[in-house]
Image: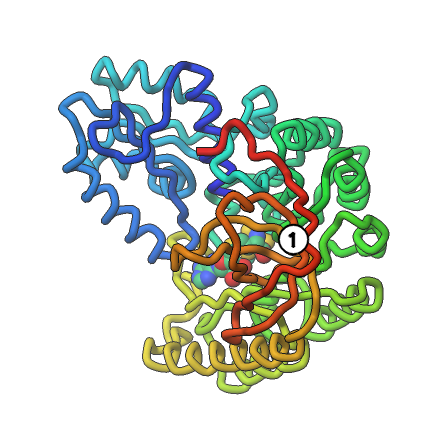
Amino acid sequence: MNVADSELMYGKLAAHGYEPVDLPDGADVILVNTCAIRENAETRVIGRLGELKRFMKPDTIVGVTGCMAQRLGPRVLDQAKHVSLVVGPDGYRALPALLDGARRGEKFTATDFDLEEHYEDVVARRFEGVKAWIPVQRGCDYRCTYCIVPTTRGPERSRKLPDVVREVQQVVEQGLSEVVLLGQTVNSYTDGTHDFADLLRAVGAVDGIRRVRYTSPHPNDFSDRVIAAMAETPTVCEHIHLPMQSGSTSMLKRMLRRYSREEYLECVARMRAAIPGLALTTDIIVGFPGETDEEFEDTLSLVREVRFDDAFMFKFSPREGTPATRMPPEWTIPDALVAQRFERLVATVRGISRENNLKRLGDTTEVLVEKVARDGELLQARSRDFKTVMVPADSARIGDYLTVQLTGTTGATFTGTPVGDKKERVPLPMATL
Ligand code: SAH
Ligand code: SF4
């Protein structure tokens, strides 16, 4: 979501004559788009803001945008004197005007929510050359007791289906063929007339679109209509990221997730019955207040039962103002125990994902080449079911669909050998940086 927001800001500023630079050295404007989900994310922003000082010219304007800006508001200006703009997720439209003001020496905090704001008239300038992030819903109406998002992004609202479809058509015109629909509980999408099932079918039917993904859905919003739409729309990929957070019903209750272990499993069963070859990934929190050994074991056993393909795992981080911070202090789990549980969870998840991946060796699958891999030699590609596959090929192949045979796995990622290369080429968009 933050990448998508950065792309909107870039689009808005580009329309006002701003040009991007590769490095912060001597930039006229530096915006740091921030996350507030865990303390760690905010600590990194503070470090980054400090580092940026050495790149500033005397007249460089530094702004902090996003969820941390929304959460801290004017406190950012007090703590970092070189910052002159603090702009929350609904304030990006005003950026050019705020920058003009900052150039006159003024300081601004813009943190009002605007429930109508979807930036419909702002044309995003995309950083990625292969897939497009498309926000379809902003904010969140759930109130999970650990989570800061409802405070930083405000109430849930959805874009109109025709507006989303129009953006997807533009994405195709720019030469992209994969879209990722974004929302905090994206499958609760409703524009008053259409639900998420309608949206999946409409986006999936756009001419030139070859892959549709979405993130993150909430287990409670998986109606049979949504699952059927997914199963029946060939462009929608066979992968669901389904955050579980915990495998214990009592813990899920304290988290106010609004489903039980059994309901989560039932949701998984409905999905797997409808979509053959479905890959499932998830989010899990360890060390939430009051987590007993038994509750943690329930999380491990749910991981084993579902056999996730992968998981994002987090140590609980208390966020100011959230209900979890008002739980009895004696419920706090000591750091050492959290660390121990976290390690066990990581080992369990990685072990299962390794076993799953070993079974896939020898399979042939279609991948979309995304970028040069970190080692600088292989290319990094993605299968429809979200597996990372390293492919030996020339960087000119970025943006191509290749058929590869999975020949090796580290346990987490694969290496693949192209087979029956059809030289299919999707042109890169003009806006690629
Ligand atoms: N809207 C999405 C999640 C967005 S935040 C959903 O409900 O699935 C991404 C993930 O960060 C969450 O799924 C959760 O696992 C984790 N997270 C959120 N708040 C956290 C906190 N206070 N401490 C640790 N992890 C947290
Ligand atoms: Fe946070 Fe829960 Fe909303 Fe996800 S659904 S953004 S975890 S409050």
The answer to which of 222 and 123 lies nearer the viewer is: 123
The answer to which of 342 and 190 lies nearer the viewer is: 342
Direction from residue 283 to residue 46 in the image, left or right: left
Which residue is denoted by mark 1 in the rendering?
402
Image x and y of residue 427, in percent = 60, 34
Quarter of the picture containing the C terminus is top left
Image x and y of residue 365, in percent = 69, 62
Which residue sits at x=77%, y=34%? 207
Q: Is residue 337 above or below residue 429?
A: below
Q: Secondary structure at mark 1?
A: strand
Does the rendering let one see residue 198? yes
Image x and y of residue 290, in percent = 47, 76
The answer to which of 126 and 360 lies nearer the viewer is: 360
Which residue sits at x=86%, y=52%? 232
Direction from residue 216 to residue 89 in the image, left or right: left
Q: Is residue 258 above or below residue 77?
A: below
Quarter of the figure with residue 200:
top right
Q: How is the image coloured?
A: rainbow
Q: Is residue 355 above or below residue 81?
A: below
Image x and y of residue 131, in percent = 59, 42
Which residue sits at x=43%, y=20%? 14
Quarter of the figure with residue 268:
bottom right
The answer to which of 90 and 372 lies nearer the viewer is: 372
What is the three-letter code of the residue carrying label 1?
Leu
Which residue sits at x=21%, y=36%? 78
Does the rendering let one see residue 384? no
